[in-house]
Amino acid sequence: MIRKWWAAVVAWLRRRSLKPLGARGEEVAARYLKRLGYRIVARGSRSGSGEIDLVAVDGRTVVFIEVKTRESAETGHPAEAVDAVKQRRLSQAAMAFLQHHGLMECPARFDVVAVTWPSDQRQPRIEHFRNAFDAFGQ
């Protein structure tokens, strides 16, 4: 009984937290990637084509990272939300980022980080898909 009550309290507190689930997911994804040695160089980079959640450098490669966060997999795995339309938008936004920063000669790739964070859990499940898709139009 107490465990159920506590889970309800934790869920309520999560919903009332200052940061929405997506923002918290991006935060834990950034910390996770930093532990892997990535250097985060931009967050929420916007262009006319869309937004890139995280831009990082892994060795000499520019990595464009899409973070998808869900409370559960009931509506599908979080990474499934990165469909062809989303991939096309990310490709265009990445191209704009590379052009704007004079990085067209640098190797680049797209990673997806799927974060599943049930409301009754303190820590999320993080799945990292390196080189998740190829750029559209290449």
Image (cartoon, grey):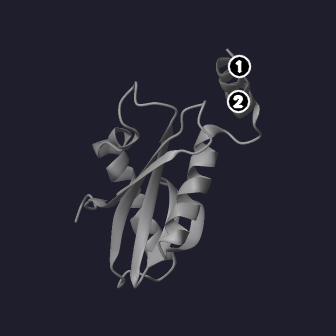
Q: In terms of depth relative to the viewer, which is nearer, 79 or 88?
A: 79
Question: Which residue lies under the disc numbered 2?
Answer: 10
Image position of 63 with respect to 80: above or below: below
Q: Quick check: marks 1 and 2 in contact, CB under 8 Å?
A: no
Point out the image quarter for the N terminus: top right
Name the quadrant of the C terminus. Answer: bottom left
When asked about the image quadrant of residue 130, the answer is bottom left
Point out which mark residue 2 bears: 1
Q: Residue at x 66, y 25 (%)?
A: 7
**Residue drawn 71% across and 42% down?**
19
Left or right of residue 42: residue 111: left
- Res. 97 mark: none
Depth order, front residue of 105/18: 18
Amino acid residing under circle 2: Val
Gap between marks 1 and 2 measured at Cα: 12 Å
Classify mark 1: residues with Cα within 10 Å, few (<14), some (14-19) or many (20+).
few
Q: Residue at x 71, y 25 (%)?
A: 6
- Residue 104, position in %: x, y? 38, 80
